[in-house]
Image (spheres, rainbow, N blue to C red):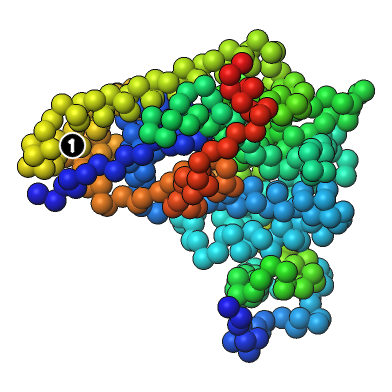
Amino acid sequence: MSAETQVNLTFPLSVDSTILSSFTSCPRKFYYEFLLKRVPEGKSIDLHAGGCFALGLEIARNAFYVENLTQDEAIARAWVHMVKEWGEYTEPEDHPKSFLNMFGALCHYFDTYPMENDHFQPITIAGNRKAIEFTFAIPTAVRHPDTGEPILYSGRCDMVVEDREGEGGVIFALDDKTTKAMNANWADQWAMRGQFYGYVYACRAQGINAIGAVVRGISILKGSYKTAEATILFSDEQIEKWWLMINTKILRMVQAYSKYKELLACFEEEHLTQQPELTHIVAAAPWEMSYGDGCMAYFRPCSFTPLCTSSEPWEIYSDWDNRVWDPLAKDPTGKSEDRFLAAGPLELPDELHALLWR
Amino acid sequence: MTTQTSELPQLTLLDEDNLPTESELYSMTADHRLRILSELRTYVLARQAHEIPEAIAQFGVLISRKLRASAELGAQKKKRKAAAPEVAKASDAELF
């Protein structure tokens, strides 16, 4: 019997839209990925290439808007950083997301939306900083099951921008998306995407009156690029409803986690030591399996299918990589340590206390 | 950790002080351009970002754009070629 006798579960100190989507689509997927912190070996080309493109945008924008370089100079600086970020990674043969295509996408993006003339310009926020890679961590009303601190809702938005068209002064959260194919309905998919509600909520929580989100998409094909833009407006009521829903969802996650601890307490320690697989069975029990749409993602079977179809999944956990998801990083999969755990106990500023208890 | 300059990979396919112009790039084969880009990437990977001369970075952009443009052309040609038999079939049908 090679099963681990201990199940090392830790509930995240901070959740983001990815974690919440995972829980919504399949609680068991959430259990594997964000509590057991298991992921398939290797890094997906989509995450690697997307992260590289996002870094290029950030570097170019900072060079242009903060350091006042020309767009050409800014793109040259982005090229250097993208080369370094890409490193020795070899993309699957014939895959459209190669280094050349991702850098080409960056050039195409700035050809389409030149920084000098773009009607969306980054706003200046506290500390005289440009709102490029705008990060946030907002305490929710739900207490962490182990630490008792408020669980944070956190994220990272590409830019907070002011629309200078018309009378100007209208603020949006702007996010860039890379995709393979872009169909006619591309712009319709974002209206209910919690990620963007979160960005707008975070802006408003910091006194920035964002009225909605702009999503810019670029499809990366071998022979061409396509761009599209979607604008979503959110009323106060919609945002409040979303925040209530987020808190409810996190509460359900905590309840399921607490159920595992309650179940575990029903067994004597000796019993668990003699039958280590029991701990795994009990740990997984509160996390329902989708048996539906959650079992497919991006037209592919969910990457956890081998665990869900195995009668003794704990026997193959060691074949999987260990990874901590960092919602605030450009590459959320890059680190193996929880930044919130490393930061120590949470000290809330007064204004966040007010938000938490309102 | 500091690295001795002599240990760092150098550019052998390019003269750092006399980089090829856009028209010179045109006259190179795609394979040669790819080798140059590969060497440039090795050069960049071995150095800190701030150590990369601006001219090298600008040239990196130029050659990457050229290679991507050639790939785009290639893909379009392939697409046209793949579509051609259908066009031929259609005209045959019209004829008979």
Look at the image and tell me whether residue B15 can be seen: yes
- Nearer to us in this view, A264 or A216: A264
The amino acid marked with disc number 1 is Thr
Q: Is residue B74 visible?
A: no
Residue that badge 1 annotates = A279
Judge whether A210 appears above or below A235 on screen: below
Q: Is residue A17 above or below residue B87?
A: above
Q: Quadrant of the C terminus of chain A?
A: top right
Q: Establish if A67 lies above or below A229.
A: below
Q: Residue at x 64, y 74 (%)?
A: B47
Residue sitting at x 72%, y 72%: B52
Give coordinates of residue A225: x percent, y percent. 67, 43
Residue ID at (35%, 22%) = A255
Residue nearest the viewer, comparing A104 with B94: A104
Image spot of residue A337 (x, y percent)? 45, 51
Farthest residue to the top: give it.
A237
Q: Which residue is painted at 50% across and 61% down in the image?
A: A89
Q: Residues within 10 Å of mark 1 (few under 14, many from 20)?
A: many
**Could you tell whether A151 is left or right of A292 in the image?**
right
x then y, percent, for residue A356:
58, 22
- Occupied quadrant, residue A305: top left
Quadrant assignment, res B60: bottom right
